[in-house]
Image: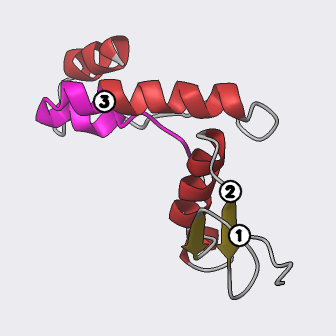
């Protein structure tokens, strides 16, 4: 008899998508095997800014639903991993002629 474990799901690739899929599947009660050629998140994921934002710039294109969904997902991530996710302050430069100041203020208020 073979004593090797049986898994419900086999995920190939330990980048952001592979790890996210594996985590979601485990959260749903599946047995998951995650295979990565190198270290987790060492490929493309290692070059990302790792900022979890809500898509502020999408307000400019009236993508209110997308921004809302992104903000809701950001809150889920923050709730699930407060040990590695924290708020950061940013300074937004303002240059006359790009966008009116009132529009920037309105966007930040809505955000």
As measured in the structure, the alpha-carbon distance from the residue carrying label 1 to the one carrying label 2 is 8 Å
Please report the residue visible at 13 percent of the width from the left and 29 percent of the height from the top: 62
Q: Which residue is mark 2?
A: 31
Can you say whether 19 is above or below 90 in the image? Answer: below
Please report the residue visible at 31 percent of the width from the left and 13 percent of the height from the top: 110
Which quarter of the rendering shows the C terminus? top left
Q: Determine contact: label 3, label 2, CB under 8 Å.
A: no
Closer to the camera, 82 or 10? 10
Closer to the camera, 46 or 32? 32
Mark 1 packing: few (<14 Cα in 10 Å), some, or many (20+)?
A: few
Mark 1 or 2: in front is 1
Mark 3 or 2: in front is 2
Mark 3 or 1: in front is 1
Q: Which residue is mark 1?
A: 6
As measured in the structure, the alpha-carbon distance from the residue carrying label 3 to the one carrying label 2 is 33 Å
Can you say whether 33 is above or below 101 in the image? Answer: below
Q: Which residue is mark 3?
A: 67
Q: Is residue 101 left or right of residue 42?
A: left
Please report the residue visible at 57 percent of the width from the left and 46 percent of the height from the top: 24
Q: Is residue 86 visible?
A: no
Q: Determine contact: label 1, label 2, CB under 8 Å.
A: yes
Residue range (magenta): 51-67
């Amino acid at each position: 008899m073979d004593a090797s474990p049986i898994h419900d799901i086999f995920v190939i690739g330990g980048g952001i998508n592979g790890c996210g899929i594996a985590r979601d599947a485990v959260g749903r009660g599946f047995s998951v095997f995650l295979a990565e050629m190198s270290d987790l998140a060492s490929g493309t994921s290692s070059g990302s800014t790792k900022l979890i934002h809500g898509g502020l710039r999408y307000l400019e294109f009236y993508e209110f639903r997308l921004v809302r969904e992104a903000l809701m997902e950001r809150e889920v991530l923050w709730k699930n991993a407060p040990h590695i996710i924290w708020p950061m302050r940013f300074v937004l430069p303002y240059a006359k002629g790009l966008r009116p100041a009132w529009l920037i203020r309105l966007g930040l208020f809505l955000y």
